[in-house]
Amino acid sequence: MKILKELSRKEFRDKFGTEDQCLAYLALTKWGEEYTCRKCKNERFIAGKKKCNRRCSRCGYDESPTAHTLFHKIKFGIENGFEMVYDIVTSKKGANSIWLAERFGVKQTTAWLFRRKVQEAMKSSEQFPLEYEVHVDEFEIGTPQKGEQGRSKSEKKIRIVIALEYRNGKPGRGYAKVIDDYSAKSLKTIFDVHIDKEAKITTDGWKGYTPLKKIYPHFEQKLSDKGQNFKMLHIQIRNFKNWLRGMHSYCHENYINQYIQEYFYRFNRLNFRTTILEKLLNRMIAHPQITYKSIKCNAT
């Protein structure tokens, strides 16, 4: 597994190699110098029953650093949880649940569930839309069916729209979303969430994009020429497909959006490799706990 050279495993273990180090980091990130009891809103605490726990000095509510985070009730050691996050976010292709299960001695379902929690923390904040020059296109995942070429309808295809930003002729950030079809209504979802209205947007000649010209003032359509006019965009489409098939082999259609989030979380932080791990850990600490049931119910 290729790991980003900016974050060696030795450096990681020097900082997060023990349970005590991980719990101390969790407590500092979660509470800092402040504390408010979840039960009675008291702002004073004493040491809890376990390491780094905080116990309300008024009502006695004892809270652990992992409670109400994505590390809640972790069953295989908090230090192993931190290292799983490290493997997922710093390896150039991520880490699938089979490999994680073998490496950490847990069931594949356990590794898969924890990966889903990590993916949940990788979800875009939707606060930083693409700017400058943005290219948009669609692609499909699924086996081509006879008589169902191009943008034809098929139950065996997963349709995805992708947007990629360019700065000084080089690819910048990118986002993608699963869509129901190629209508203007479906395509508009990525524009609404991820593209600045003042961006210079270029798409191919598909009629589904045409109504969007009324909303985005710097909108241009041109023929794709079999992808030649959108070379860098098609490279990213190919890279995503190769990553999904090569690393994960199979992904249920209900969870494709989560794998998209994971891919672009790493892609969008290629220039911030030294901080990518702690940024993700902080997101997982700030994110409310989730259960397997909620993951199943919210699958899209």
Image (cartoon, rainbow, N blue to C red):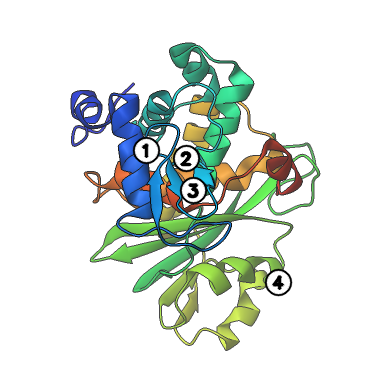
* Residue at mark 3: 121
Report whether residue 123 is seen: yes
- The x and y percentages for residue 211 are 65, 81
User: Viewed as shown, does residue 203 lie left or right of 10?
Assistant: right
* Residue at mark 2: 64
Q: Nearer the viewer, mark 4 or mark 2?
A: 2
Report whether residue 280 is seen: no
> In the picture, residue 145 is in which quadrant?
top right
- The x and y percentages for residue 67 are 52, 42
Q: Nearer the viewer, mark 1 or mark 4?
A: 1
Which of the two labelled residues, at mark 4 and mark 2, occupies the earlier sequence position? 2
Q: CA distance from mark 4 to mark 2?
A: 45 Å
Q: CA distance from mark 2 to mark 1?
A: 7 Å
Secondary structure at badge 3 equals helix
How many residues crowd around disc 3 within 10 Å: few (fewer than 14), some, or many (20 or more)? many
Q: Determine the residue positioned at 70% across, 62% down.
A: 182
* Residue at mark 4: 185
Tell me: residue 216, above or below residue 292: below
Q: Are marks 3 and 2 in contact (CB under 8 Å)?
A: no
